[in-house]
Amino acid sequence: MSPSSGRFRWLALAASTMLLVGACSNASTSPSASAGAPASAPASASAPASGGASAEPSAVTGASCASNATVVKFWTSHTPPDSDTLKKIVDAFNAANADICVQMTIVPGSETDVTKLITSIRGGVAPDVYMADRFTVPQRAAEGVLDELPAEVAALKDQHVDFAWNETQYKGKTYAIPFDTDARALWYNADLIKAAGEDPAQLDISKGAPTIDLVTKIADKVSKKDASGNYDVLGWIPGGPGSSGAGAFDQGWHYTWGFDYGGKFADIAACKVTPTDPGVVAGFQFMYDWQKAHDPKAVSRWVSTNFPTNTPAQQFPFWTQKLGMTISGDWQIANAVKYGGGKSYKFTYIPVPKAGDKPTTWAGGWSMALIPNSKAKDQAIKFMTYIAGPEGQKVYTKDTTHLPTLKALQADASLYDPQHKVFLDLLPGALNRPPLAVGGIYWDALTQAQGAVELNTKQPADALAEVQSTVQPRLDEVGC
């Protein structure tokens, strides 16, 4: 098979996979953030998921460019407030490079949904630069959706933290440039906790990681139900559902709790996914048990009422006083200033199963990738190295309180206030999702399993065995 025919075979397979996922479920797979949105976020890690493929793209930059400038089309799924900072960086690049016009377009979707991108590639109207959730880069490279980057970009390796760079690699080649990263913690509303008769000092980060039992006890005091038995205020929601169904609320993902219980999600050396690892199963068991104790249907009703699809960032339930605690990330430092209404928001370690357990966190992040057959390849790469270089990452770090992947910027004390510095100090010990050529497929399968477990319709071990049987054959096909 020629490289060209292999690429289009993968594009067709990827497109059919995404259509199948869409037909089977309306659940969003976005980490609300970085995740990623955050992831999220994933949508960005700092904003709720944007509801998927039905929303229309919207161009937000490039209007003032010179008529003879070479156009570079840049797509992102990020929404405000993070997209506001992306626009700021793009505008600065355009101002400094009059011969290039980067046109940034917000293309709503989630981290693992590339339906619009694949359609644009097949239709010959693809962007030049695509902002890809970094853990999906190996899969997109295997599918032929991303183009290999030249040697001068690969030479940037030592400037970035190792885990972020490793996520841009597939079979020894570079397919993206890391842009940002993050770390996760338990955020809590000290005012709501105090009003519920509990002392928020119990959760002070100086005391170390709280236990899950302590956090649940405090959260249950914060929770309030109306006369119909529906939650009006929820003390916390450690897992999901998310705004569109199966998946996490904020950063309460399968990876969060699998890591927290000591789980290992993959054996890279053996080229195996390991969703049935005892620690992963234990994390899913926690989500099953918590939901059972708090009524899965009542929790789902609270989410659909307070966090529907396309909820604006300022209406996030943590800011509207409808939620006492949430697993989230460093990006909330900036959001608390914008949307917090002057309330007392603090953070501590993700709660641990038992007193004395080592706390965990994990890091995600995004990257800048080149789409194959770009007609402005050189200009696109120049923009990518700018936005993912010191100029772009410095602005993004300062404005959004994400973390940079550039080692030099991590050492720049001027970028971090005391709160932000705590998250930076968490980063060296952060875990990350395994960089697999089925990373998106694995995420989606784990997300569906999480949804079933939290609805109490499947036992954790059974749901995760299904993930194993679904994902491993795909990994065997593409390899590590």
Image (spheres, grey):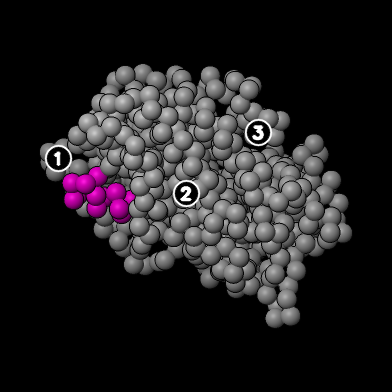
Instruction: Using the numbered discs, state the Cα–Cα distance from disc 1 to disc 2 in whole angstroms.
Output: 34 Å
Q: Which residue is mark 2?
A: 79
Q: What segment carries the magenta color?
A: 114-126
Q: Earlier in the sequence, mark 3 or mark 2?
A: 2
* Three-letter amino acid code of the residue under disc 3: His
Is residue 336 at least partly visible in the picture? yes
Most common SS among magenta residues? helix
Question: In the figure, is residue 40 to the left or right of 297?
Answer: left
Question: In the figure, is residue 359 to the left or right of 412?
Answer: right
Q: Is residue 247 magenta?
A: no
Q: Earlier in the sequence, mark 1 or mark 3?
A: 1
Q: Which residue is mark 3?
A: 420
> Percent position (x, y) of residue 318?
66, 55
Q: Which residue is mark 1?
A: 4
* Three-letter amino acid code of the residue under disc 1: Ser
Question: In the figure, is residue 284 to the left or right of 369?
Answer: right
